[in-house]
Image: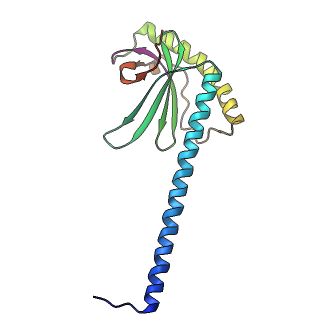
Amino acid sequence: MKLMAAGDQVLVAEFGDRIDEAVNDQVHALAAKIEEQQYISESLDQVMRDMGYNVVGSREVVKKSGRKFRNELYHFSEGSVVNVTYAANGQISIELGGVDTCDREPSEEESSVLCDEMVEFCDEFPEIERRLKEKGVVLMNRISMLPPAEEYAQIINVSDFNMTDKVD
């Protein structure tokens, strides 16, 4: 058993207060980050809806590595969707793909059609950015913006998603 003098008790109390303050600061910073990501997600969702893209499916995924992300599918055209991926670290990716109920690669014809649709969506992307900026959301630290190309064409297996609407 250790006896503490009155001065030691004051030191322990001050140290405990500093720990509480540091933890409180971290909790507030995390809450602010979560709130910011939620605002960005809601803003992008509103912009997409305003431009005529409706959510048709979503999913939440936790990889074996523990990495988490969320996807939302927006109807683009007959047989294709815009897949928006929100990573837990704040990164967002947006890509267009065809749909099916199985995992597969697109045919040459599908790749050609999807490439044309990529061009169409990419032409609309500056308007998405402009509308997000009006809401105070500015895209920063862009990792990459790949040009439309048949080699990027993909088929999204909608069986992996909670579908709320059919994609015609």
Q: Residue furthest right?
A: 134
Q: Residue furthest left?
A: 1
Residue at 51 percent of width and 39 percent of height: 91
Secondary structure predominantly adopted by residues drawn in magenta:
strand
- Residue 16 is left or right of residue 140, and the answer is left
Residue at 49 percent of width and 68 percent of height: 20
Q: How is the image coloured?
A: rainbow
- Tell me residue 157's x, y (percent): 38, 19
Nearest the eye: 105 or 10: 10
Residue at 51 percent of width and 25 percent of height: 95
Q: Which residues are magenta?
A: 96-103
Nearest the eye: 146 or 53: 53
- Tell me residue 29's x, y (percent): 54, 55
Task: Work out whether 22 lies above or below 72.
Answer: below
* Count of numbered circles in the view: 0
Nearest the eye: 19 or 91: 19
- Residue 48 is left or right of residue 103, and the answer is right
